[in-house]
Each structure stands twice: as structure tokens, then as C-alpha cells.
Amino acid sequence: MISRAIVLYLYSEYFGETDPAVHVAAIRSRADWIPGLIDATANGRNQADGQRLIQMYRQLGLDLSAIDNPIESGILNVWQRMHSGRLKVFASLSKYLDERRLYRRYERDQIVKDRDNLQDALRCLVSGVSRMRTKPQPAPAGPCRAYRGSNSWMR
């Protein structure tokens, strides 16, 4: 069996601090068919609060699923993708690249949790890559079968 390596391309970024309706509009403006992933327990939320947040975003029109976003194994998965060429980042993603430069560990080998939202989002994406899909293609138009009536030469 031949296995094809899935290459992820990061080509757009969004980061903002505003109300959910603005977030949804900004996310959907990029492509409303792309499924989203969210860590329900991120930013210190408890599971119930995270599920309410997911429901709120779904009601606003996002196709959103909860996903586990482990830190250490997630960082390793991202690192492996980067170093194997299965993660490509467009140079135009200035916010992501600024965060990436600051991403580090401190003396107890723990990740510094400051200005790392896009790094967290990338870990979430890599953890949920199996849920991603390509853009749905419209069904091809079939042959035209116009009915011309009983007196027509086309029957």
C-alpha cells in the first residue's frame, strides 16, 4: 500500500480580540467550507464552558469540532512536520512568524505561555489533520435532455 504524506500549507492567519460574531465573519471570509478545530479546555476553560463556547460558534455558522490539543506531543508532531517538509508556511504570515520566533522554554523545560495563540492553533491543526478535507467540487453538469414535445423530431 502506498501512503501519501499530507503536506499542510499555512497561507492565511487571523488573530483578534473581539466578540464571537466578528471572529466568525473573519474566519468564514477565508473559506466557509473549511472545518474548524477548537480545544475546549484552552485558556484555562473548564470542559463545560468550552462546550458552551463551541455551541455558540456553531450557532453563528462555524463547522467546529472539539479536539484534544496536548502540548508536548503536539509540539513534537509540529516539529516533525516542519523538519520533514510536510509543513509549509507562507512568508506573508507575519503574526505567526513573530510568535514562532518568541516560542521558547524556560529553565524548567516548560513552554513559555505568552503570545503563543497561533502556535496553539497550529498544534490543534496538526493534531486534527485527519479531519481536514479538500474543497468540495460542484457536481459536473450532465447532458442536456430537453423535452421538445410530442411533435418534435427529438424524442
Image (cartoon, rainbow, N blue to C red):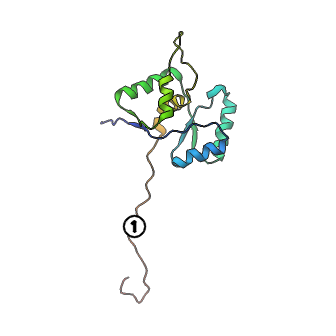
Q: Indicate the amino acid at tag 1.
A: Gly
Query: Where does residue 36 sit, x and y in percent of width and height?
Result: 54, 40
Q: What residue do we see at 51% from left, 47% from top?
A: 30
Residue 138, percent across and down?
A: 44, 58
* Residue 109 percent coordinates (x, y): 51, 12
Q: Residues within 10 Å of mark 1 (few under 14, many from 20)?
A: few
Q: Position of residue 98 (x, y in %)?
A: 49, 29
Is residue 27 positioned above or below 94 on the image? below
In the image shown, does 124 or 13 lie closer to the viewer?
A: 13
Quarter of the picture containing the N terminus is top left
Check the picture and name the quadrant holding the C terminus: bottom left
Total numbered badges shown on the rendered structure: 1
Instruction: For mark 1, give the secondary structure.
Output: loop
- Residue 14, quarter of picture: top right
| Residue that mark 1 sits on | 142
Name the side, left or right, on which 114 lies relative to 2.
right
